[in-house]
Image (tube, rainbow, N blue to C red):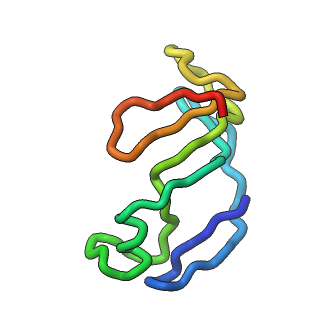
Amino acid sequence: MKAIVLEQPGTFRLTTMDEPGKPGPGEALVRVRQVGVCGTDLHAYQGTQPFFTYPRILGHELSVEVVATGVSEKGDHTQGDHKGRPYNDTEEVGSSI
């Protein structure tokens, strides 16, 4: 799979990473469809985020498609679902992307 890595402040690199394995119990494998850029990402790029180490993959505001699920007692994620997680929100948001 492709990933964009912030190698050091000001330097991105497009790379290929191993595909993740099958999801385990209570896990879901997702395909990222959209990523929001926030102030934390900008500070990381500028090198002014004191808590970050490099290299790192940025992005925590995501819109994803569920590709596969592991065994779950809740059954709250199903293959083909579209989910979003806004920054600092404790509940995921379903949508019809």
Q: Residue 11: x and y, percent?
A: 53, 84
Does 7 appear above or below 91? below
Q: Residue at x 56, y 16 (%)?
A: 75
In depth, the one of 3 and 23 nearer the eye is: 3
- The quadrant of the image that shows the C terminus is top right
Count of numbered labels shown in the rendering: 0
Does 53 appear above or below 86? below
Q: Residue 63: x and y, percent?
A: 57, 43
Q: Residue at x 46, y 39 (%)?
A: 85
In depth, the one of 30 and 95 nearer the eye is: 95
Q: Residue 54: x and y, percent?
A: 44, 77
Q: Residue at x 46, y 53 (%)?
A: 60
Residue 90 lies in quadrant: top left
Residue 24 lies in quadrant: top right
* Direction from residue 87 to residue 63 in the image, left or right: right
- The quadrant of the image that shows the N terminus is bottom right
Does 35 appear above or below 84? below
In depth, the one of 71 and 7 nearer the eye is: 7
Q: Residue at x 35, y 73 (%)?
A: 43
Q: Residue 44: x and y, percent?
A: 39, 74
